Amino acid sequence: MKEKVIEKKILKTILWTYIIFCLLIAGIKYGMGDSMSEKMKESINWVWHFYENWIKMFFIMIASFLTLSIIGKSQHTIMRKRNLIGFMTTALVVHIVLPIIMSNRELYLFAMPLPWTSIPLQLANSTSAYHAEKLVTLGVGGISAAMIFYICFSILVFGGTFLFGRRLQCSTLCLFNGFAAEVFAPAIPLVGNEKKMKDSTLKFFTILRWLFLCIALFFTVWWLLILAGVSVGDGNALVKKIETIKYLCFELMMAMFFWVAYRGRAYCYYCPLGTVLALLGRVAGQEIITNQTKCIQCGKCNEACPMSIDIKSDAKRGVAVRNLRCVGCGHCVDVCPSQTLDYTTRFLKRKRK
């Protein structure tokens, strides 16, 4: 028990460090960008990318082992181990291996197919300021390589979702919010206890989910129209600025606020990519099976679910759980004492047969 307390304190310290330094560096980078000299901008960018790649990777590795140590002593952890291994592998590839091979320290910005920012689409647009900037540092070959990575990663996420459901992205690949919700799970929230979702809060997040999807689609369509040669006026700079503010205030800062004072998966409730993948997961037949044995109505599945899904009620009737909020994390599967739950899709069912 004493070891767990120490491990949780270390975990909380790492997360606090990640949040504080991330906000500090981002504040300098975006808040003082116009007033800094070119040399200072280069220095801040180097620090930012080093932090986002090497330091973040180091934190994910250490936090994953600490989390495994904490949860592994008290419960079945097959699904959660797979989550952590997935995030460690993804972080190693996206933050370390490929950036070194491709000489592109911003590659992580291309690892979100429906972007919370439209960086990949701006890079593909030869008239954008971002393209002009990267043309100098990366060259034509570097830009092409980044776009190939973006396309391949998008195919992996969307194609993989038809096979494995939302679990692939949200509980294995996501390096924005999904990784933190898993690798820092025992430490979140940093202040107080995890807050339970009221029905009114769930309704609010549902509205927010569709609102943010519409906003993300607007920015995506805007840059796609420009790429297609359609004239959309002279608002590119304004659109980019609004999108940056949206990302910093309502996504990056809000996600971190949730880690500090609410719950790890709160951003996942309205993540635009998550919403799209939830719909694709429905097509893929994503569900939580509840009738492998007999449900004893202990309620541990509901307590473990980070997305506030009422698994217990469906398990009582022996019907599968099909909920758009499900991120496929498998926490409910791991904690079920009667082992009546299992995560599956049509593809996984055929594979097991």
Image (spheres, grey):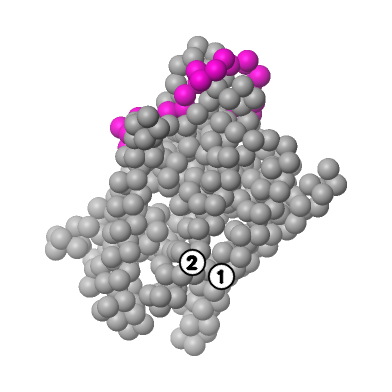
Contact between labelled residues 2 and 1, with CB atoms less than 8 Å apart: yes
Q: For mark 1, does the 10 Å Cα neighbourhood hold few (<14), some (14 to 19), or many (20 or more) residues?
A: some
Kindly report the distance in space between the C-alpha atoms of the residues bearing marks 1 and 2: 7 Å
The amino acid type found where label 1 is placed reads Trp
The residue at the far top in this view is 317
The residue identified by callout 2 is 95
Foreground residue among 146 and 213: 146
The amino acid type found where label 2 is placed reads His
Please tell me whether residue 291 belongs to the stretch shown in magenta.
yes
Residue 156, percent from left and from top? 33, 52
Task: State the quadrant of the N terminus.
Answer: top right
Residue 122, percent from left and from top? 30, 66
220 vs 110: above or below: above
Q: Is residue 57 visible?
A: yes
Q: Is residue 128 visible?
A: no
Q: For mark 2, does the 10 Å Cα neighbourhood hold few (<14), some (14 to 19), or many (20 or more) residues?
A: many
Q: Residue at x 53, y 46 (%)?
A: 83
The residue at the far right in this view is 2
Specify the segment rendered in magenta: 280-305
